[in-house]
Image: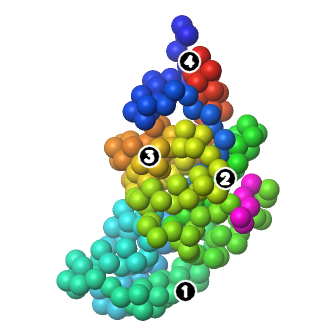
């Protein structure tokens, strides 16, 4: 191979890091909040308001850094810091219930610009799309079939109910791989948050990190993203050449 392909260095670096002979993308494991939907500002606002209602001090921004964690883990971090204690399952149910109530009363989160094109690139190349989210927000999960018709199926979803450990633990993505019956070298993860990227990389998947909020692409690269983009629309512009390069580099070995 004489000419340098787009993303060649990134792809080869990833393969060397994971000791892969080749990559054969068959499944795309796709995060929901901040990736499919521009919902993170709303989630951050809802968490901040709920904590304010019970007199616990937080900043709206900190919730962007907890993105991907389970509700219990998020509440635990804040409670340990502010109250010097962890949380109980009853408390989590009540407080997460209230947070969901606040979120659901907000205007519906828009579909992330560019993501439909990225999904089409996956399905056009015969890849199976699997939702892998730490969320248990039924309102967004229910919208998937109308917003992205024919892309996701109910049977191929990993939500907060399916896992014991949330991101950054690799379990959610490993469960996604098991649902489709593919190996890590056959998966591409699409993520927007450092903890999600970390989980995807730990699961052994080629992880695309897209900075769709206040956290810069460098943080996603540090978390283990194989490639990063500064927006979903720039990811959409590059995704075809990225997938082609992966195939050509794998075939050339
Ligand atoms: Ca996310």
Q: Distance between the residues labelled 2 and 1?
A: 33 Å
The residue labelled by disc 2 is 180
The residue labelled by disc 4 is 253
Label 1 environment density (alpha carbons within 10 Å; few <14, some 14–19, many ≥20)? some
- The one of 24 and 183 positioned closer to us in this rendering: 183
Q: How far apart are marks 2 and 4 (CA)?
A: 26 Å
Identify the secondary structure beneath mark 3: helix
**Residue 204 is at least partly visible in this image:** yes
Q: In this view, does 152 lie to the left or right of 58?
A: right
Disc on the earlier residue, 3 or 2? 2
Against 162, residue 95 (above or below) is below
**Residue 199, percent across and down?**
43, 54
Q: Toward which corner of the image does residue 178 lie, by quadrant?
A: bottom right
Q: How far apart are marks 3 and 2 (CA)?
A: 18 Å
Indicate the quadrant containing the C terminus: top left, top right, bottom left or bottom right: top right
Question: Residue 101: which disc?
Answer: 1
Q: Give the range drawn in magenta.
A: 151-155
Q: Which residue is drawn at 47% across and 88% down?
A: 93
- The one of 87 and 184 positioned closer to us in this rendering: 184
Disc on the earlier residue, 3 or 1? 1
**Residue 90, percent across and down?**
42, 92
Question: Residue 201: which disc?
Answer: 3
């Amino acid at each position: 191979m004489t000419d340098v392909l787009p993303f060649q260095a990134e792809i080869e670096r990833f393969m060397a890091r994971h000791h892969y002979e080749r990559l054969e993308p068959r499944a795309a494991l796709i995060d929901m909040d901040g990736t499919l939907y521009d919902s993170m500002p709303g989630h951050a606002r809802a968490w901040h308001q709920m904590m304010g209602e019970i007199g616990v001090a937080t900043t709206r921004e900190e919730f962007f850094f907890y993105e991907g964690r389970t509700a219990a883990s998020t509440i635990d971090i804040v409670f340990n810091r502010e109250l010097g204690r962890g949380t109980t399952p009853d408390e989590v149910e009540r407080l997460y219930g209230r947070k969901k109530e606040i979120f659901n009363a907000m205007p519906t989160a828009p579909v992330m610009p560019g993501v439909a094109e990225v999904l089409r690139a996956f399905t056009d190349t015969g890849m199976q799309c699997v939702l892998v989210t730490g969320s248990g927000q039924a309102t967004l999960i229910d919208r998937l079939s109308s917003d992205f018709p024919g892309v996701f199926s109910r049977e191929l979803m990993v939500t907060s109910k399916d896992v014991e450990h949330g991101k950054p633990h690799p379990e959610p993505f490993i469960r996604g791989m098991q649902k489709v019956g593919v190996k890590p070298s056959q998966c591409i993860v699409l993520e927007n948050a450092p903890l999600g990227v970390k989980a995807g990389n730990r699961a052994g998947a080629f992880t695309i990190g897209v900075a769709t909020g206040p956290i810069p692409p460098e943080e996603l690269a540090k978390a283990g993203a194989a490639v990063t983009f500064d927006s979903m629309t720039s990811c959409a512009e590059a995704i075809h050449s990225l997938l082609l390069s992966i195939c050509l580099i794998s075939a050339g070995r």
